[in-house]
Image (cartoon, rainbow, N blue to C red):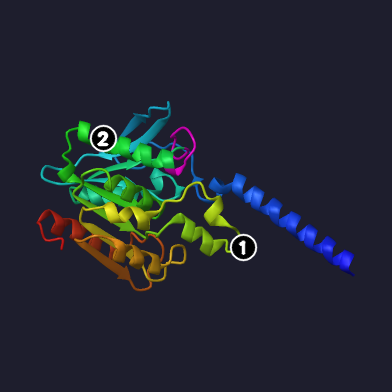
């Protein structure tokens, strides 16, 4: 009996070790779900949006869509979530452009025709390159608003802690990918395994720009409690709005109007 027990324990340990090894090697496949298809803004019925290609220092090509702001309006530098493509966000782009806001939306590596493979280091570096591109275009940092959607919230926070911006909008944000992964995979030692950590709750303490957080109270991907904890850790001025019954990344219903109204108040100096 003791021998059988030892065999069972050894087998279970080997299976667990193998599972941990597979998860470690393939971990980014559980974080990033890119749609590599490249679509032009014109094909997405966005005639006033142009495609830009950003060349990275390590030789990759990053696809971005850029719709210019009307005079006196801010430009939103938008970092999308972990799935889909730029085309998936076309209605979001359209709505802000119709309000006169500019929109610069960058596709991570492996998404929407961008070359390379996504990682935290690459995404943040490319996001900073996108910021620099806007500044070189003549857009003042006082006219740049960062918008981070889900995964992109962690990217936006890391850009904001090092660059001057007018404001930061976080849509369905998390405290860290480590905490999120631990929630989904409690049987794995994720705190030891993860390469891409996106420690937003640690980085946000260095963000001094006005902050707005939007989170659905019924978000089943990133719990609303994470958005609330991130808000508590952030510096003033800050504001949070939670949407009763709202799910993950909600651009429909009242959410667009809520965010757009905050942008208007920010521009009028009444964001606090």
Give me the residue at 39% from left, 44% from top.
86
Q: Is residue 216 above or below residue 104?
A: below
Q: Nearer the viewer, residue 198 or 249?
A: 198
Residue 111 on the magenta span: yes
Q: Nearer the viewer, residue 246 or 195?
A: 195
The percent position of residue 150, horizontal first and vertical second, equals 39, 55
Q: Which sits in the foreground, 28 or 79?
A: 28
Of tags 1 and 2, the one toward the viewer is: 1
- Residue at (17, 37) in percent of width and height: 139
Residue 75 x/y as whole percent: 21, 44
Q: Which residue is mark 2?
A: 132
The picture places residue 26, in percent across and down from the top left corner, at 60, 46
Q: Residues within 10 Å of mark 2 (few under 14, many from 20)?
A: some
Q: Main secondary structure of the magenta part?
A: loop
Can residue 49 be seen in the rendering of this structure?
A: no
Q: Marks 1 and 2, Cα distance to the nearest angstrom?
A: 41 Å
Query: Where is residue 126 drawn, in percent x and y?
Result: 36, 37
Label 1: few (<14), some (14–19) or many (≥20) C-alpha neighbours in 10 Å: few
- Which residue is tagged 1? 187
Q: Horizontal placement of 268 versus 15: left or right?
A: left
Question: Could you tell me which quadrant the N terminus lies in?
Answer: bottom right
Which element is circle 2 on?
helix
Figure label count: 2
Residue 174 falls in which quadrant of the image? bottom left
Bounds of the magenta segment? 110-120
Give me the residue at 15% from left, 45% from top.
142
Residue 55 at least partly seen: yes
Quarter holding residue 249: bottom left
Query: In the visual, does 107 lie left or right of 253?
Result: right
Location of residue 212 (image quadrant): bottom left
Q: Find numbered disc 1 in the image and state the secondary structure of the residue it sits on.
A: loop
Among the two numbered marks 1 and 2 on one chain, the one whose residue lies closer to the N terminus: 2
């Amino acid at each position: 009996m003791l021998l059988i027990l030892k065999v069972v324990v050894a087998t279970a340990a080997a299976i667990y070790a193998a599972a941990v090894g597979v998860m470690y090697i393939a971990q980014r496949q559980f974080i990033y779900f890119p749609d590599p298809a490249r679509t032009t803004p014109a094909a997405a019925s966005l005639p006033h949006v142009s495609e830009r290609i950003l060349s990275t220092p390590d030789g990759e090509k990053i696809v971005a869509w850029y719709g210019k702001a009307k005079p006196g309006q801010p430009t939103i530098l938008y970092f999308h979530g972990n799935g889909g493509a730029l085309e998936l966000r076309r209605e979001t782009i359209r709505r802000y452009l119709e309000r006169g806001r500019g929109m610069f939306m960058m596709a991570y590596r492996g998404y929407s025709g961008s070359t390379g493979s996504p990682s935290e280091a690459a995404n943040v570096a490319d996001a900073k390159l996108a910021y620099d591109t806007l500044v070189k275009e003549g857009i003042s940092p006082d006219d740049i608003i960062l918008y981070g959607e889900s995964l992109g919230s962690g990217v936006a926070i890391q850009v904001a802690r090092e660059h001057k911006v007018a404001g930061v909008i976080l849509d369905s944000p998390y405290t860290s990918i480590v905490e999120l992964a631990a929630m989904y995979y409690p049987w794995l030692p994720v705190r030891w395994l993860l390469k891409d950590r996106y420690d937003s709750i640690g980085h946000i303490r260095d963000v001094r720009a006005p902050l707005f957080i939007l989170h659905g109270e019924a978000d089943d991907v990133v719990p609303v409690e994470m958005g609330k904890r991130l808000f508590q850790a952030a510096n003033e001025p800050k504001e949070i709005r939670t949407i009763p019954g709202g799910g993950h990344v909600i651009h429909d219903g009242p959410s667009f109007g809520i965010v757009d109204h905050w942008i208007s108040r920010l521009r009028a100096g009444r964001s606090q």
